[in-house]
Image (spheres, coloured by chain):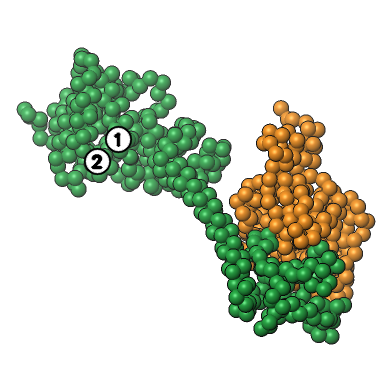
């Protein structure tokens, strides 16, 4: 299985080459084009209950699509719905990532996607909800962001503060606390940041350069209000 | 090429920030850590227990973190594999036991705190739901207020028509005329009445009368036979009319439908509720009102009788007399349980009402009783 990011930047695609018999799972609706040797199947990843919990708990899609090179070698082109970068990670069976609900684009068959409950404070204040996706297993993992993806590398004990709306993925060896952006409550909200996540290494945190919620609010002001 | 199955992540100054997968073995004197070099098993690093510091870490504080200063600098190992952690706990010397137990204690505390917070949150949510379900009549009333009268009428009508097809209806005669006149007298005294009441006399010895949502009332001839005075029948009618006016039937249905239905009505999804209510048509016939609803129908019924210039004491005496009888035989009592407190409350309210001149009915009660086949004469 080989992968390559095409047109890096705001409107990228990922090309994934599959040898005969290989398959990947991708977010429903992610396929842009594929070789005629590729079969597209719809699958409830993790069984019915797994798919149900993913749909209702994290807001992810109920079905994933499986792209299988059934009749020989082929390739598929995948793209996310929103404009933004794509990053390809390689999971080795030991490193695991938590991914915000819109961040998953595709994964090798060996990747397990499950929804996991967060602590109460993180669920309430992180902006990610009470349940987020946990990616584990072995193989290629393709994530996408809204805007550019920036990788923050944290050494053991090193800290970094991230606005909660900009999180994409973070390794499970990191830990984070939710805190006010400034020392005072009023200033914390008038600064426009509200709550932030204080990450502590070791590990990697992927962030996105644009805030989807902020963008939504910005667009909303231009939508005419119907009578 | 040997298969390399890492079981831990190692962090160090020369390693990438995401850590390097490694294979940890627990030996009697310490750990051996093997790294994969270009897909091949590379050099192994031996770490004695004496140089290791232990703590808990990771996103959920569920990983065992071992750190030490090696020849290549500071190293940190994140262990999640339960077999390796168990082996480490068994092999660790005494000086590591304390920090190890502290780390384990920390993990347990974090987990216990998570469970407690979620337990409290879940318990609060459950308490709130139960509170809304059992206690919050305000929400039920709010939901009932949003149901149009036409819907209520459709709901009641289907159950009413269905009931009448299975019973013999008295179409005319003195009993029907009497009930019609009583109803007109009472209904004319209801201000802003949104209902068109339909009263039917059903030929049956069952001592019963009931009201369905939407203004449909059934009076059994058995109940009329049991009544010694016409005011007693008028009392039952006033009571049943007020079950309709206060929308008690609808309130019971909404309560039975549950919290989800209430929320759907409050937030405007009345379509789905209509479907559910259709299925409840059969259950309408066995609907029992709550104690508060009975009291409300009693008191408002008493006031209605007073305004209609009908002697309200008939209502109380009839209720009391029925209560003395066998409750299993008198069906009306099974859906309208009578207690002495209830009768006393009515008597108190009646005592506080101003004197009212009574207006006689145009029909002859003895003729009604004769038509019903009930004994007539003095004392009845």
Image coordinates for residue A109, horizontal then vertical, percent: 76, 71
Picture residue at 39% right of the left edge, 33% below the top: B247
Residue placed most toward the observer, B4 or A188: A188
Circle on res. B337:
2
Residue placed most toward the observer, B259 or A131: A131
Quadrant (top left/top right/bottom left/bottom right) for the N terminus of chain B: bottom right
Which callout, 1 or 2, points at the residue further toward the start of the chain?
1
Mark 1 lies on residue: B294
Picture residue at 68% right of the left edge, 33% below the top: A186
- Displayed quadrant of residue B3: bottom right
Say whether residue B257 is left or right of residue A102.
Answer: left
Quadrant (top left/top right/bottom left/bottom right) for the C terminus of chain B: top left
Image coordinates for residue B278, horizontal then vertical, percent: 46, 45
Q: CA distance from mark 1 to mark 2?
A: 9 Å
Residue placed most toward the observer, B161 or B342: B342
Contact, mark 1 vs mark 2 (Cβ under 8 Å)? yes
Circle on res. B257:
none
Q: Is residue B361 above or below residue A54?
A: above
Residue placed most toward the observer, A174 or B171: A174
Name the subunit of mark 2.
B
Say whether residue A1 is left or right of residue B310.
Answer: right
Dot 1 alpha-carbon crowd within 10 angstroms: few under 14, some 14 to 19, many 20 or more? many
Q: Which chain is orange?
A: A
Q: Is residue A101 above or below residue B197?
A: below
Name the subunit of mark 1.
B
Q: Is residue B97 visible?
A: yes
Q: Secondary structure at mark 2?
A: loop
Say whether residue B150 is left or right of residue A114.
Answer: left
- Displayed quadrant of residue A116: bottom right
Image coordinates for residue B188, horizontal then vertical, percent: 33, 20
Among all residues in the image, which is located at the extreme right? A7
Colour used to depict chain B in the structure image: green
């Amino acid at each position: 299985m080989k992968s390559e990011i095409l047109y890096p930047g705001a409107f990228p695609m990922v090309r994934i080459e599959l040898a005969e018999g290989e398959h990947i799972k991708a977010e429903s609706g992610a396929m842009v084009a594929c070789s005629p040797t590729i079969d597209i199947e719809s699958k409830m990843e993790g069984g019915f209950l797994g798919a149900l919990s993913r749909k209702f708990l994290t807001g992810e899609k109920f079905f994933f699509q499986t792209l299988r090179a059934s009749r020989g070698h082929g390739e598929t082109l995948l793209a996310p719905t929103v404009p933004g970068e794509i990053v390809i990670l390689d999971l080795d069976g030991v490193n695991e990532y938590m991914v915000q609900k819109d961040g998953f684009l595709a994964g090798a068959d060996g990747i397990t996607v499950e929804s996991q409950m967060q602590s109460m404070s993180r669920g309430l204040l992180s902006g990610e909800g009470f349940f987020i996706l946990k990616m584990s297993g072995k193989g290629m993992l393709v994530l996408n962001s809204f805007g550019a993806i920036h990788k923050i590398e944290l050494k053991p004990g090193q800290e970094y503060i991230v606005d909660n709306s900009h999180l994409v993925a973070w390794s499970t060896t990191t830990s984070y606390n939710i805190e006010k952006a400034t020392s005072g409550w009023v200033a914390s909200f008038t600064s426009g940041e509200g709550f932030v996540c204080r990450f502590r290494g070791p590990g990697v945190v992927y962030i996105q350069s644009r805030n989807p919620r902020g963008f939504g609010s910005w667009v909303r002001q231009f939508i005419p209000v119907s009578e | 090429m040997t298969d390399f199955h890492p079981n831990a992540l190692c962090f160090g100054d020369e390693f990438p920030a995401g850590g390097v997968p490694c294979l940890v073995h627990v030996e009697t004197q310490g750990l051996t850590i093997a790294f994969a070099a270009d897909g091949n098993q590379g050099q192994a690093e031996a770490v004695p227990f004496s140089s290791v510091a232990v703590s808990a870490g990771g996103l959920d504080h569920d990983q065992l973190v071992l750190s030490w200063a090696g020849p290549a600098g500071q190293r940190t190992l994140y262990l999640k594999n339960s077999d390796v952690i168990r082996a480490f706990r068994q092999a660790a010397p005494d000086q590591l036991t304390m920090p190890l137990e502290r780390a384990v204690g920390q993990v347990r505390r974090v987990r216990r705190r998570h469970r407690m917070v979620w337990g409290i949150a879940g318990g609060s949510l459950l308490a709130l739901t139960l509170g809304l379900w059992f206690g919050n009549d305000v929400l039920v009333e709010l939901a009932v207020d949003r149901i149009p009268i036409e819907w209520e009428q459709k709901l009641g009508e289907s159950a009413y028509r269905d009931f009448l097809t299975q019973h013999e209806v008295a179409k005319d005669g003195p009993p029907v005329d009497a009930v019609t006149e009583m109803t007109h007298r009472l209904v004319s005294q209801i201000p802003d009445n949104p209902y068109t009441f339909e009263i039917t006399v059903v030929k049956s010895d069952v001592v019963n009368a009931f009201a369905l949502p939407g203004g449909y009332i059934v009076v059994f001839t058995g109940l009329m036979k049991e009544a010694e005075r016409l005011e007693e029948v008028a009392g039952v009618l006033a009571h049943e009319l007020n079950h309709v006016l206060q929308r008690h039937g609808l309130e019971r249905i909404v309560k039975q439908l549950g919290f989800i239905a209430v929320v759907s009505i409050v937030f405007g999804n009345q379509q789905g509720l209509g479907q559910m209510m259709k299925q409840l048509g059969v259950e309408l016939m066995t609907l029992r009102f709550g104690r508060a609803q009975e009291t409300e129908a009693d008191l408002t019924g008493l006031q209605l009788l007073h305004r209609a210039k009908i002697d309200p004491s008939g209502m109380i005496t009839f209720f009391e007399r029925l209560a003395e009888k066998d409750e299993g035989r008198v069906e009306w009592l099974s859906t309208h349980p009578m207690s002495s407190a209830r009768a006393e409350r009515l008597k108190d309210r009646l005592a506080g009402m101003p004197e009212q001149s009574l207006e006689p009915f145009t029909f002859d009660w003895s003729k009604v009783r004769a038509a019903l086949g009930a004994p007539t004469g003095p004392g009845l």
